Each structure stands twice: as structure tokens, then as C-alpha cells.
Image: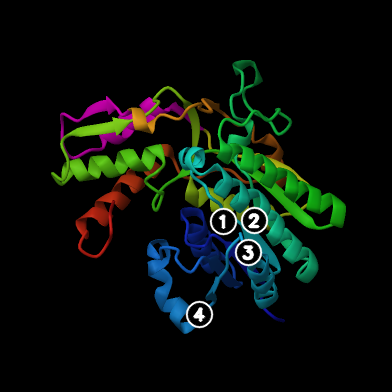
Amino acid sequence: MAKKRALITGVTGMVGSHLTDFLLENTDWEIHGMARWRSPMDNISHLLHRLNRQDRVHLIHGDLRDSLSMMNVVRETKPDYVFHLAAQSFPKTSFEAPLETLDTNVQGTNRLLEALRQHAKDAVIHVCASSEVFGRVPKEKLPIDEECSFHPASPYAISKVGTDLIGRFYADAYNMTIMTTRMFTHTGPRRGDVFAESSFAKQIAMIEQNLIPPVVKVGNLDSLRTFADVRDAVNAYYMLVTVNPVGGEYYNIGGTHVATIREMLDTLISMAKVEGIRVETDPSRLRPVDADLQVPNTTKFTTHTGWKPEIGFEQTMGDLLEYWRGRLSDASTHAVR
């Protein structure tokens, strides 16, 4: 029997690279990772030997903003499972490039699903939306369940509302097995430094190595977040497509550790190898409007799949800090902004 084939869009991102690691360890699937020709390879550098040997991991170039590209990717890979993770994923950047964000995330998802409808209609498909779709949620609606109304607080969040709804539309209209997820904050090694916790960890690692003064620049520290580890998140995505997948369903997924951004920063600072680190607000790090209460109700997903997070918050933060220490200690071979 031929091995199952998985297509991961955005394979070079934090989640895509960890999902590849997970599938290599826990399945016998052939993995086809889609990336733009100019995507940095840092997050999958440890897989280059397998890529070069075509050892269960294959790279295919594609761009969500090019319909012909999407058709080619799907025809070439013929996937049984699809994890659509690729996106313009930075909320702050979306204020500066809203049209690019909408094109990539909304129309890009439509282009991919249309290609799948025509060439791989029987695939089991995961469309990754975001908890940002809920935006500014009043306290009385916490924890946030799947039926909470959308109130997006950034062009990125608006684009993910479109992503969410297009996935559900294709499932309903064309009888495709497509599930959408709203993953709440998930982080860990390889997290991009445009996100708060990774930026803080990077700055602390730089302070430890005397590369910058002992000051961590911050934005809004009062937002409340529920943190999960990226390695738990990719396990959730695997279970989503393999445990009785139901087309058209949509799930909130997230961790169990709730903390403000300030408390998360305090945890990272407590792990620093130096003392006397100060905190300073940087106005450029503030969003025009913020999704400030992000606490999920994950009962629907955990009941359906049996998934639960395994990795604790302290380990996640410690591993993230170690990731940046490693990046910086070998700065001669890694470009660090």
C-alpha cells in the first residue's frame, strides 16, 4: 500500500517545521512542504540532509498569491492530508500591509482550496484560522467558545475571519473534509521575533551576551493570554485530521496556562543569567488596537479528539530562551536582526 502524503503549506515557519518533525517521528507519511522560493530555511536546516536525499521530506515552491502555482503544488503532491499553515501571520505588520495580508490569507486560502477541489477533493484538510478572529471579547464571554461573535482587532484578524469562513464554505458547498481551527497563543523554539514572548527572549539572550544594554523594550503588557507549546499544538493538528475528522467543523484549541504579557515577561526575566534587567515601553511596539482577553474554552476539541497539552509553561519559556541563546552564540552563521 502506498504511503499517505501530507502537504504542509508554510513548512518553513515555526509551526510548519515542528509539524514536519512530529510527522517524521510519529507516522510513515511522505511529507511535502510548500515554501516560497525566497523563504528562509533556518527552521528546517536540521532537515536539509533528508531533503537532499528525498528521505520522506520534499520541498515544493509555491505562492498563495498565484493561482497557477497552487494548481501545480496540488497536482504535484496529490495529498491525502493538507495542513494549511502558510499566512502573513504578524498582526502588527498587517497594519502596515493590510492589502498584502488580505490577499495572502483570504484569497490565498481560496486559491488553495479551489486547487484542492479540482485535483484532490478527497483530501482531509486543516485550515488554520486564529484566535485573533474573536478580537476584543468582553469579560462576561470568557472563556471564549466556538460560537463567540467575531470582533477582529487588526487587518490580520480580519483576514483570518475570511480564512475561517472560506474553509467552512468549501466544506459545506463542495462536501469536502475541511476543518478550521482557532489556535490560541502557541510558542516555543523557532518562534519569530516579531511576537512578544520571542522578542523578549531574544533581548534577554542579547543582554546576557553583552550585545545590548540591560533593557527589554516592550509594548502592551496588560493583555491576557493563554499559552500553549508549539509541540503540543502540532500534535493537536495531527489529531484533528486523524481522529474522526468531520468536514465543516471548527474548533478552538489552546493551552491551560493563563497569564498577562507582564507575567510572561517576569517568567523570562527570572530565567536570565544576569541581574538588573529593566523594562521600558517602546511606543513602536504598541498596536492601534489590541485583542486583550484571549482565554479559550477548548471543550469541543478535547472531547472530540482526547487531546490535551503536555508541556508546561515554564518549559516552553525556558526552551524559547535557550533557542535564542543558541542562535546568538553562533551569530557568525546565523543572521540575527
The label on residue 55 is 4
What is the C-alpha distance between the residues marked 4 and 2? 29 Å
Residue at the extreme top: 140
Of callouts 1 and 2, the N-terminal one: 1
Task: Identify the secondary structure beneath mark 1.
Answer: loop
Q: Earlier in the sequence, mark 1 or mark 4?
A: 4
- Badge 3 marks a residue whose secondary structure is loop
**What is the x, y in percent for residue 224?**
48, 26
Q: Which residues are magenta?
A: 257-282
Which of the labelled discs sits on residue 86, or is there none?
1
Residue 161 or 172: which is nearer the viewer? 161
Residue, x 53% and y 75% (percent of image)?
58
Could you tell me the amino acid type at mark 1?
Ala
Cα gap from disc 1 to disc 2, whole angstroms: 9 Å
Q: Earlier in the sequence, mark 2 or mark 3?
A: 3
Q: Are circles 4 and 3 on residues that touch, CB within 8 Å?
A: no
* Mark toward the start of the polypeptide (4 vs 3): 4
Residue 190 in percent (x, y) is at 39, 53
User: Picture quarter containing residue 275?
Assistant: top left
Q: Is residue 315 within the magenta segment? A: no
Q: Are marks 1 and 2 in contact (CB under 8 Å)?
A: yes
Q: Residue 108 shows which numbered tag?
A: 2
Check if residue 266 falls in the magenta segment: yes
How far is disc 4 from disc 3 in space, using C-alphas?
28 Å
Dot 1 or dot 3: first in sequence order is: 3
Nearest the eye: 179 or 170: 170
In the image: residue 335, left or right of residue 219: left
- Report the side of 236 relative to 174 (left or right): left
How is this picture coloured? rainbow
- Observer-side mark, 1 or 4, equals 1
Q: SS class of the residue under badge 2?
A: helix
Residue under label 3: 66
